[in-house]
Each structure stands twice: as structure tokens, then as C-alpha cells.
Image: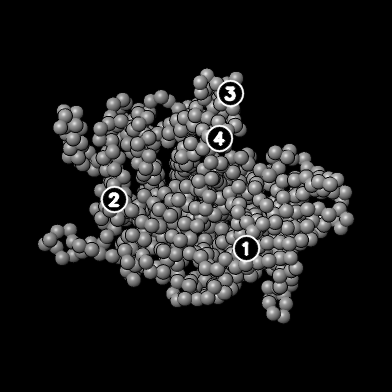
């Protein structure tokens, strides 16, 4: 063994003997005094936000109404029974009249709070609303004009007019610009003729297709006849009736001529939703059924639009960020629910004693391995919760006039990272429960299956990462090629203040990192900013740099080849971007709370430790990058980092039940609070 290897081993062993150095940085949590316990009411107030009365009314409904009993977890029920129970639950929530469809546009903060709250019960219920309100109702609200609003919105909001969001096709999901469904305008009858020309062109997956939906928003290629040929005007949205009114044989109506529906049948989750396939053969609709906010066809078949043709489709799709944020909050709520259940079990489940002489077994939550499975994800859930609240603030009329491309990037990035984190968290929660984690009645496996779907719902996460990266790359490129190549603005303004060396903590600087530095929030901020900047700069160099003294032209085969080879960087850049924003937004909310009259030092201290823990865990996941780029140095940095995460998790663990209690999951959906079965 060479001398260098022996020296590294010796340095690591020296570090491992200095546990006392880390202990000195942490409060003792062996015995907590009353004054050291954080304020759970304050935590819940922060999480519930300004619409806490609405949240409480929903919790009361869930707890009191048998409609929200999760019968499908207790015994086999038919698909029809599950679907009807879901629809009844939707009706009972609507009767509370807590939100209006127009809130998606006029009060998105309230709508998002409401949507997260309805995500506490059977996830089929929140998804039914996502279909009815966000998608079907959203297309009418955001793509339609007054005539469509007056005709449809009231009945959509009341649940009287159930509808379908007909975008995704069997053959086209992420590439919606390649849809095959056709809408041809007939000037003679003043009608659009809707056709599904191929098997792959059937509208596929949307809820409300196979049973409940009466109408559909159908996205189709608009074809306008020009002499003996037809001109493709791109993708547009049309309102298409698919069922009649109530009939003697079917209270949801009969399929209309030319409409074909198929049921997708059982899935691994969301079986309360009537997903299906929908196709059309020469289905005629009146000209006014075209949703014409951005474009229209007049009676002579002439196309009118103030949006350039190369921007029309992007403009059409840009209005649906609210639905993506709703699914992100849905994943976050599933994560919170799973953590609440797992913490309850880990607190009640006792295994082994501290010594062979003792016969008293200890809760498994005392073990560092259990703490490391759960506590970092409690920290992550608090951080992501606060981040979503800041984004919701930006959407309100009273907030900053944030550009649509920024909001689109936020909704795409946070949906991807939140849903991935939710799946990770629920899998670890399942493992903590052991055999109990397999039982449907304990909800964990059900929650995990539903969180898994969100990773591809409303956009495959990997594709969303590409959208975030393209947005950041375009912002970076526009500055680099400008007359002020070092004057970054907007989302990249942080680059202007990044220093080459980390902030000096406690009189240190240079060389190996001190333990004080490792728990420093300013140091964490510097690391997160440097990572994102380096990654964006690296990708930009690959795509726009010189190759053989020749500038690589965008939108060429050569450029695409480089882009395709660089796609793994997109996920890294999106993760880096969301991690930086999450820390910034979390600290923003902590500071707001600290400045309020109701704040107490123990609660603020705990929240800052949650912020530290979350950031350190994200840094650990990308440790190779930080070491390779010289941002973290020292032969034993890996074990220092692990020790700090372990100790923070240990310090937070006595408060774990209070932190999850603040999630306020209704008892009906939170088993194992006082037992292990």
C-alpha cells in the first residue's frame, strides 16, 4: 500500500475520532424542556397559510362524510363503485363552494391551497378535479372567449357538465405538436369536421372519457381548404359533444354518432377515474365551438391570429401551468401523508434494547438508520412547501409581475423534482413500516403508486427538465452574446454576485472545510449557486462553443446531436435550479415568520435546521460534482458531510411527530398514530 493511501486512511481515522467536535455544534436532545419544544400551532399556521379556514372545512368534511372512506383499501370493490364514489365525493366538495373556476386565473393562490387540501383523501378525487376544473374547465377559461365562458363555465364549476381534456393521443404524448387528430372547416355548413385518421390518433388516457364526460376539448390540426388543397394551420382547440343528455338506459347519456369510446380498465392507481380512448369519424361541430382567444376562422374560412405562427402553439400551451403546479402539490401532499404515517409507526414500534442487560426495547425512530430514512424528507417537504407558497405568491394579482416563461419554468421544474422526491420518500416510508408497509389499509403502497404516476402526468419529468434547461440556456445565451456579457438579469441575476471563493465562516477560509462552515447557510447558498452556474456554462459551451474553429449553428443536425448527447445534463441543471430556488424560497418564508409577532426562537431554530438538513442532503446526492469542481475539499469531506446529516437528523427527530402533526392529515387518512397495526 503506497504512502498516499496510508495518509488518506490515517486522516479519515483521525476525523472519525473527533465526533465530539460535531457534538459541540448541536444542542443536546436527550431531554427536552417545555421551552425548547417548537410551537406546533405556529408550524401548522405556516403550512396552512392564509386559507386555513378553507382547509379546516375540507378536513372536517373528509373526517365526517362516509363518502371519503377509502373502501377500496379495505376490500375489493368494482371499478364502477369506485368511480361513482369518486364522483359523489367531488359533488360534496363542490357543495362547500370554497373555490370558483375563475380562481385559477384571478386567485391562483387560493386555488392551489384548495387543491393541495383535497389531495389528502383518495387521490382519485383530486385527479377528478384536475380533469374537470384544471383541464376541461381550464381550456374553456384560458383558451375560450366570453361566448364560451357564458355557455359552459357555470355548469362546469357546479359539476353539472362533466368534460374531457382531449390532448394526449395514443401515439403522441410529450410531442403534442405532432398530434394527428384533424379539424377541417366546411364553409358551406359553417362547421368543423373532426376526424381521428389513425388508430394512434385516438385521444388516450384523459379522465371522464369512458363513462361520465358529456363534452370534450379536442386539440386537433386545423385544416383550411385553399382551392384544391388544404393548409395545415397547426394545433387548435375545439369543444366537441361526445354524449347525449340523460337517457332511459344511461344517466350519463349515450355516445353521439361518430364518437367511439373504449375503457382502459384497471390500472395500478387512480381506479376511481374513468380513463379511456376517444376517437372521431366525421363528427361535425359549429364554427363557434373553436376556442378562439388566440385565433379564429371567419365565415369565409379565413384564418385570423395576432400571434405569429411559430409562437401560436407555445402560447396555447403556456396557460396550463396552474395544472402542473396542482400536480406538484398533489405529490407533495402524498409525501406528507406518507411521512405522517411512517413517523407514527416508527414512534410506536419498539425493537431491541440499548444494552444486553436492559430488557426495555426502544422505538425504531431512535435508530439513526430510521432517522436518515425519514427526517431528511420531512425537511424536504417543509422546504418544498414553502417554495410552492412563494411561487403561489408570484401568481397573485398583488404579487410581482412575473413573466410567463419564468412561471412555466418554475411549474415544470418543481413538478419534476417534487414528484421524484415524493416517490423516494414513500418508498423509504414503506421500508420503515416493514410488513405493515404492504398492507393497503395503511395507505403507504397506495400513496406510492399514485405518486409514481405524477412523475409522468402533466408532462414526463425528463421532458420537463429539458424545458427548464432550454429556458435557462436561452437566458444565459442572450446575455453572453450581448454587449454586456457579464450583466445577468432575472432568473440568472445571482451569477453577478457569485464569488470565486466561498464566504469566510468563523474566521476560516481556504483548505479543508471546518465543521462550522459545513452547517453555514451562506456557504450552502454559495455551493448551490456555483453548481447551477457551472452546469449551465458547461452545457452552453457544448452547444454554442466552437468546434474546429466553427460556431455550431442552432437548429441543425450537428446542434441536435450535441443536445441529444447532453440530455443527462438537463436533469442535473433542473435539479440544481430547483435546489437553489428551494433554499432561497424556504429562507424567505422563515424570515417572514421570524419577523412576525407570533414567532418563537425554538420554532425558527428548528426551521433553519430543516433548511440546513435539506440543503446538505441535496449536496450529498451530487457530492462528486462538488468535489470534482473543487467546491468541497478535504480527504474526509464525505464522512464530515454524512456525520453532519446524521447529527442534524438526530437533533430534529425528537420533534418529528410535531413536524408531521403540523401537516394536519385527518385521522381517517393517518393510521398508526397510536399503534403498530
The mark nearer the N terminus, 4 or 1, is 1
x, y percent for residue 61: 54, 69
Residue that badge 4 annotates: 560
The mark nearer the N terminus, 3 or 4, is 3
Residue that badge 3 annotates: 481
Residue that badge 1 annotates: 277
Q: How is the image coloured?
A: one colour
Q: Which mark is residue 650?
A: 2
The mark nearer the N terminus, 2 or 3, is 3
Tag nearer the camera, 1 or 3: 1
Local packing at callout 4 (Cα closer than 10 Å; few below 14, some 14-19, many 20+) is some
The answer to which quarter of the image holds residue 83 is bottom right
Give the CA separation, mark 4 to mark 1: 34 Å
Tag nearer the camera, 2 or 1: 1
Q: Residue at x 26, y 56 (%)?
A: 366
Local packing at callout 2 (Cα closer than 10 Å; few below 14, some 14-19, many 20+) is many
Amino acid at each position: 500500500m503506497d504512502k498516499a493511501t496510508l495518509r488518506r486512511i490515517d486522516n479519515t481515522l483521525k476525523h472519525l475520532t473527533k465526533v465530539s467536535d460535531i457534538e459541540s455544534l448541536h444542542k443536546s436532545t436527550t431531554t427536552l424542556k417545555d421551552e425548547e419544544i417548537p410551537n406546533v400551532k405556529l408550524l401548522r399556521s405556516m403550512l396552512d397559510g392564509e386559507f386555513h379556514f378553507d382547509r379546516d372545512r375540507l378536513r372536517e368534511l373528509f373526517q365526517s362524510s362516509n363518502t371519503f372512506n377509502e373502501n377500496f383499501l379495505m376490500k375489493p370493490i368494482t371499478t364502477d363503485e369506485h368511480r361513482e364514489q369518486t364522483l359523489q365525493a367531488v359533488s360534496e366538495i363542490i357543495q362547500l363552494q370554497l373555490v370558483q373556476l375563475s380562481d385559477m386565473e384571478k386567485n391562483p393562490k387560493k386555488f392551489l391551497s384548495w387543491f393541495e387540501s383535497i389531495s389528502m383523501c383518495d387521490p382519485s378525487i383530486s385527479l377528478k378535479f384536475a380533469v374537470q376544473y384544471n383541464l376541461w374547465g381550464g381550456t374553456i377559461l384560458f383558451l375560450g372567449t366570453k361566448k364560451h365562458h357564458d355557455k359552459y363555465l357555470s355548469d362546469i364549476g357546479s359539476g353539472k357538465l362533466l368534460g374531457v381534456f382531449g390532448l394526449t393521443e395514443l401515439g403522441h404524448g410529450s410531442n403534442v405538436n405532432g398530434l394527428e387528430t384533424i379539424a377541417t372547416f366546411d364553409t358551406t355548413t359553417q362547421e368543423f369536421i373532426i376526424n381521428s385518421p389513425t388508430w394512434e390518433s385516438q385521444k388516450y388516457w384523459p379522465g371522464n372519457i369512458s363513462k361520465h364526460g358529456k363534452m370534450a376539448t379536442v386539440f386537433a390540426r386545423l385544416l383550411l381548404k385553399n382551392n384544391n388543397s388544404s393548409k395545415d394551420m397547426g394545433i387548435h382547440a375545439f369543444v366537441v359533444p361526445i354524449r347525449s343528455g340523460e337517457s332511459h338506459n344511461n344517466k350519463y347519456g349515450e355516445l353521439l354518432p361518430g364518437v367511439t369510446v373504449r375503457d382502459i380498465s384497471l390500472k395500478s392507481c387512480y381506479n376511481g377515474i374513468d380513463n379511456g380512448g376517444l376517437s372521431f369519424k366525421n363528427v361535425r361541430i359549429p364554427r363557434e365551438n373553436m376556442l378562439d382567444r388566440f385565433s379564429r376562422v371567419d365565415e369565409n374560412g379565413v384564418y385570423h391570429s395576432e400571434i405569429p405562427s411559430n409562437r401560436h402553439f407555445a402560447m396555447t400551451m403556456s396557460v396550463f401551468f396552474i395544472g402542473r403546479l396542482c400536480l406538484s402539490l398533489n405529490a407533495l401532499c402524498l409525501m406528507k401523508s406518507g411521512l405522517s404515517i411512517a413517523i407514527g409507526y416508527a414512534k410506536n414500534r419498539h425493537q431491541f434494547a440499548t444494552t444486553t442487560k436492559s430488557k426495555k426495547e426502544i422505538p425504531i425512530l431512535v435508530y439513526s438508520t430510521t432517522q436518515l430514512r425519514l427526517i431528511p424528507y420531512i425537511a424536504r417537504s417543509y422546504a418544498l412547501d414553502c417554495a410552492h407558497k412563494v411561487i403561489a405568491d408570484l401568481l397573485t394579482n398583488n404579487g410581482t409581475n412575473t413573466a410567463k416563461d419564468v412561471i412555466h419554468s418554475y411549474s415544470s421544474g418543481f413538478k419534476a423534482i417534487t414528484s421524484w422526491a415524493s416517490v423516494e420518500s414513500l418508498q423509504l416510508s414503506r421500508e420503515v413500516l416493514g410488513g405493515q408497509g404492504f398492507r393497503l389499509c395503511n395507505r403507504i403502497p397506495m400513496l406510492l403508486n399514485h405518486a409514481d404516476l405524477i412523475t409522468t402526468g402533466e408532462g414526463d419529468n425528463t421532458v420537463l427538465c429539458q424545458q427548464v434547461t432550454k429556458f435557462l440556456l436561452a437566458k444565459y445565451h442572450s446575455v453572453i452574446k450581448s454587449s454586456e456579457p457579464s450583466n445577468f438579469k432575472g432568473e440568472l441575476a445571482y451569477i453577478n454576485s457569485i464569488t470565486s471563493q466561498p464566504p469566510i465562516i468563523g474566521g476560516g477560509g481556504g483548505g479543508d472545510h471546518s465543521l462550522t462552515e459545513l452547517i453555514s447557510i451562506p456557504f450552502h447558498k454559495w455551493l448551490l449557486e456555483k453548481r447551477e452556474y457551472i452546469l449551465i456554462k458547461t452545457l452552453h459551451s457544448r452547444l454554442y462553443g466552437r468546434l474546429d474553429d466553427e460556431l455550431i449553428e442552432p437548429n441543425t443536425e450537428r446542434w441536435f446531436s450535441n443536445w441529444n448527447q447532453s440530455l443527462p445534463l438537463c436533469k442535473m441543471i433542473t435539479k440544481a435550479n430547483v435546489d437553489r430556488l428551494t433554499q432561497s424560497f424556504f429562507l424567505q418564508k422563515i424570515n417572514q415568520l421570524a419577523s412576525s409577532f407570533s414567532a418563537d426562537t425554538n420554532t425558527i431554530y428548528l426551521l433553519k435546521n430543516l433548511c440546513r438538513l435539506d440543503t446538505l442532503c441535496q449536496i450529498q446526492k451530487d457530492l462528486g460534482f462538488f468535489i470534482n469542481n473543487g467546491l468541497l475539499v478535504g480527504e474526509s469531506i464525505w464522512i464530515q458531510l454524512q456525520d453532519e446529516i446524521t447529527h442534524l437528523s438526530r437533533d430534529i427527530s425528537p420533534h418529528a411527530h410535531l413536524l408531521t402533526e403540523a401537516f394536519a392529515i385527518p385521522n381517517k387518512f393517518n393510521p398508526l398514530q397510536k399503534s403498530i397495526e
